[in-house]
Amino acid sequence: MRVDVVTIFPEYLAPLELSLIGRARRAGLIDVVVHDLRDFTHDRHRTVDDAPMGGGPGMVMRPEPWGEALEHVLATGRAALGAGATPVLVVPAPSGDPFRQATARELAEGDWFVVACGRYEGIDERVLVDAARIMPVRPISLGDYVLNGGEVAALVVVEAVGRLLPGVLGNAGSLEEESHEGGLLEYPVYTRPATWRGLDVPPVLLSGHHGEVRRWRRDEQLRRTARRRPDLVAALDPATLDRRDLEVLAELGWVPGREGGLTRRLGPGGPAVAD
């Protein structure tokens, strides 16, 4: 897979040389190419921003350097991958669609994406409109908050996608039981010693009974998700749940709804309400 990142702070992407992603880069599993947006300016101050049209606070990133930068990225990427290659342009922004595990999987199924790291009040909207003539454009948001720029999001997206690529993780099976796989959060994990500061590992994990361990982990996934992310529980399809799943959720006040999905009761015996 190839990933291009365009930024005014190339050094910000240095952590991608570390850990599993760094090892994957050295093994040729993922090629991360970082471009300095200022290389595509033509004034001695290397200006990339200007005042917003219509007035207002802050500065907006100018379209000219972005246009040239994306043209360069397309040319170099196609030289490496083939003339018909087309990337997905990922644009981190608070106004973007939520970045989820499903989004990471979709990007991992492709062979090339580009991250455009905005700064200040954002990138001139015409850049996205122009880019959409050539490639899919996906504005994404890490959450309901504002960052100083897109570099943090670029690090997140590259790691979330990169770790899904074959060969990047030492134990690919661990992907199957992580949070957000199958719509649930991950179960609690423990290691030795069995007792620490008066706290014991759940006995079932010491039993050696693999079937009971699997069931306990599934139950804990359901309980943790219901406590921390009720929105995920509401989105579950009851048809994909077994009898024990439904029993655990019923204990927590969740029951199948009349029109599909799960609904939460207001209280013991009370009416169910959709979330």
Image: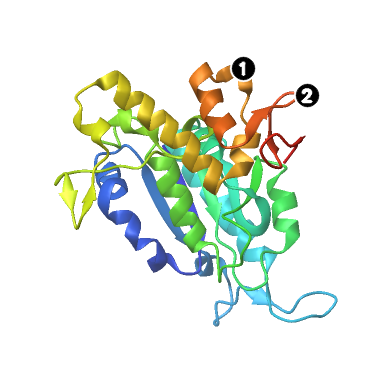
Mark 2 — residue? 259
Q: Position of residue 169 (x, y in %)?
A: 29, 36
For the C terminus, the quadrant is top right
Marks 2 and 1, the one that precedes in the sequence:
1
Q: Position of residue 30 (x, y in %)?
A: 36, 41
Q: Is there a contact, CB below 8 Å, between mark 2 and mark 1?
A: no
Q: Secondary structure at mark 2?
A: loop
Q: Is residue 41 left or right of residue 109?
A: right
Q: Is residue 180 visible?
A: no
Number of numbered discs on residues: 2
Tell me the residue at 47%/33% (across/down): 181
149 or 89: which is nearer to us? 149
Q: Position of residue 234 (x, y in %)?
A: 65, 35
- Give the amino acid at mark 2: Glu
For the N terminus, the quadrant is top left
Mark 1 — residue? 239
187 or 135: which is nearer to us? 187
